[in-house]
Amino acid sequence: MGRAEARRGQGREARRAGRGGGIRGLLTRRRVLGTFFGLCLLAVGAFVALYVLVDVPAANATAKKQSNVYKYSDGTLLARAGEVNREIVDLDVVPEDVRKAFVAAENKTFYQDQGVDLKGSARGLFNTVSGKGKQGGSTITQQYVKNYYLTQDPTISRKVKELVIALKVDRRMDKDDILAGYMNTAYYGRGASGIQAAAQAYYGVDAKDLDLSQGAYLASLLQAPSQYDWAIASATGKKLVTERWGYTLDNMVEKGWLDDSERAGMTFTVPREPRAAPGMEGQAGYLVEAADEELERQGVSEEAREAGGWTITLNIDKQRQKELEKAVDRQLESQLDREGNKIDATVQAGATSVDPTNGEVVALYGGVSATRHWISNATRRDYQPASTFKPLVLASALENRSKTQSGSLIGLDTVYDGTSRRPVVGSDIPFKPQNEDGRSYGDISVQTAMDRSVNSVFAQMVVDVTPSTVKRTALDLGMPDKGFPAVPSITLGTMNASTWDMAGVFATLDNHGKKVNPHIIKSAEHRDRVAKPVDGTGGQAISRSTADTVTRSLTGVVDNGSGHEADSAAYDAAGKTGTSENNKAAWFAGYTPELTTVVALYGESAEAGGGQVTLTGTANSGRANGGGFPARIWADYTRGALNGGSAATFDLEDVEHGESGITQAPVTPPARTGEPERTQPPGTEPPARSPSRSPTRERPSAKPAPSRTTEPAPSASTTPPAEPTDPAEPTAPVDPADPPDERPGRGGDGPLGQ
């Protein structure tokens, strides 16, 4: 009985134990399941809360930044400007097969999914928490959100925000817009952000010109840009990116986007070697600056430009630009000793070349380099154009049918007294400029006065026309209206102007008097707007007869006068030299039927502040006048720009010869201290005056020699050389009775001679 009771007790204990163990086990399972579902509910609730609370933010600062791209007229890259090398392009610019390559490489289900990959995101979160990096299975939408709205920080909070925002973005945006945003914001290596910059960096083409093989490489590159850049990749990296390239194409076949036979025939396209992005060194900075200034004038503010995204194509002809740079190097820089010669260190060159038919600036020289000399010598307006202004005086006389003091109609054959320092007649303001080197010519024709750049002749002519009338003509031709006074001294070019300004003036003469407006921008486009282009030509500024007569006179300057260094059998040319007082600036403004170019040299102090200094002694050559270095640079460039020359000739109509006749009796100039008083060189007689004749008109041949029928040929002893032989330049004497603003050389910048 004891044993039986014991067995019954053991059974009861066993049953109790069984019941107790079962309950505990059941409670444990319930607890686990409850906890799990509770956590799930909390997670769902938290996610719902996040979805409600986390809104789509504004784009991050970097995502919208773009560079501005500047191109030559042929579309080749000139320079990029901006902090981020990115140029946003519309999706339809990118070839369709390239777009699909990106989808095949990164997210095959892109067009079907809801913008997120939960499995991939979970893997990404786990990798982030476990310290295995930021890799994950993000969709294209998630990567776009990360690039455009968030940051690249590998944090849990950023990953969660990415997931929430991706869901919202997928609901709000079209898939193609998301894909475009992704391709434009992704970083491809080599400093390139966005598909356009990447296409340029790796293959030297625009995004629109990518083929499928190239596009598949760029799509594959995004997984690891530094590892997969062919130029720096290890053997393993090259193997991996080639495999990924193949994987991308295979996925395209799988999706039906690529024919299997076409895939079989494709080969990997090796990217080109890296190249430094064009910067602002050399002439690029000057060209970009000129383009930006023009955009400003056309209503594109600095703020709008700084935001980036502009593609600006210039009128600059790449080959002509090179020819201009080479001409300056050959004719000037190669002869200077900038390190060892103080005068050579001060020399600055500038030039602007314009197509006279449409105003396009086809070449521009701003200085030794935009990173070494910050002021563009092509567009600066702090020097005087000197005697390059004289053709405008003649143009005004012709246009207004002005007459001399004796009543003769002014034309090329009209005779004036060319005595140096002869006081003008008919002006309330006394004026008696000195000719170059003090030379006197006696009675000479307007044509010869233009050839020799005789100051006294044009001083009288501006009075005959009236200074205010001359100024009005100058403004009509394109001289900048900077408030220069309408006084007799304007005949010597005492206002300020740039090579750009003077190129426009002379291009208008070249264009038979039809106004030419120099402009450097061919097109300026942004995704959101297009800048209004400059109208390169305008109405008739002066009559064709006037313009063609001035052109005829300027062919004489090149053929027989101060600009003979620019002469060549390779082209028909017209031009005018100019040299300011104290030789602070030297100019040559010239043109052919196809090209107008103005070249200038400036003396700029190498000291801080950069004041104006003399060019005399440049390259140990004495006086650096406009007929020297500038004319030689002009000729060298023009030959190259015209591919060795041109058969084109000036088509001149109704050239106005005017009436010969003497404006007045010669006035004996005051004696100079220390030298005998004379109006003609010793041993010569003043030339006989030619009789008056009625104006005649003619249509000249290609390179006509200016008529000399109204002027007796001077003897060898009286004919001045075309180029000055005395390096020392005398200063114009000042009459104490002259008003200060009319004294030659006011402020040290009044021009003398050529």
Image (tube, rainbow, N blue to C red):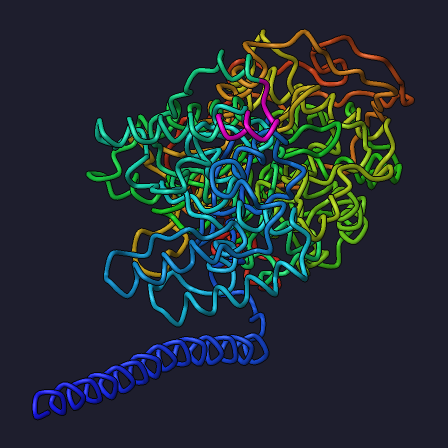
Q: Would you place residue 298 above or below residue 511 in this image? A: below
Please provide percent x and percent y for residue 180: 60, 46
In the rendering, at what x and y percent does residue 266 appear? 48, 15
Magenta span has 690? no
Q: Compare residues 114 and 28 and report the one nearer the observer.
A: 28
Residues drawn in magenta: 250-259
Q: How far from the left and from the top, in percent, is residue 6?
A: 11, 90
Q: Residue at x 22, y 26 (%)?
A: 235
From the viewer's side, name the closer residue of 525 and 180.
180
Q: Is residue 731 left or right of residue 422?
A: left
Which residue appears farthest toward the right when viewing the image? 694
- Relative to 176, is 349 on the left or the right? left
Q: Quadrant of the C terminus?
A: top right
Q: How many marks?
A: 0
From the viewer's perspective, tell me whether residue 270 is left or right of residue 554: left
Question: In the figure, residue 127 lies in which quadrant?
Answer: bottom left
Query: Can the viewer see residue 497 in this picture?
Result: no
Splitting the image into 4 quarters, where does residue 300 fall? Answer: bottom right
**Residue at left offset 68%, top offset 40%:** 523
Is residue 289 depicted above or below 706 in this figure? below
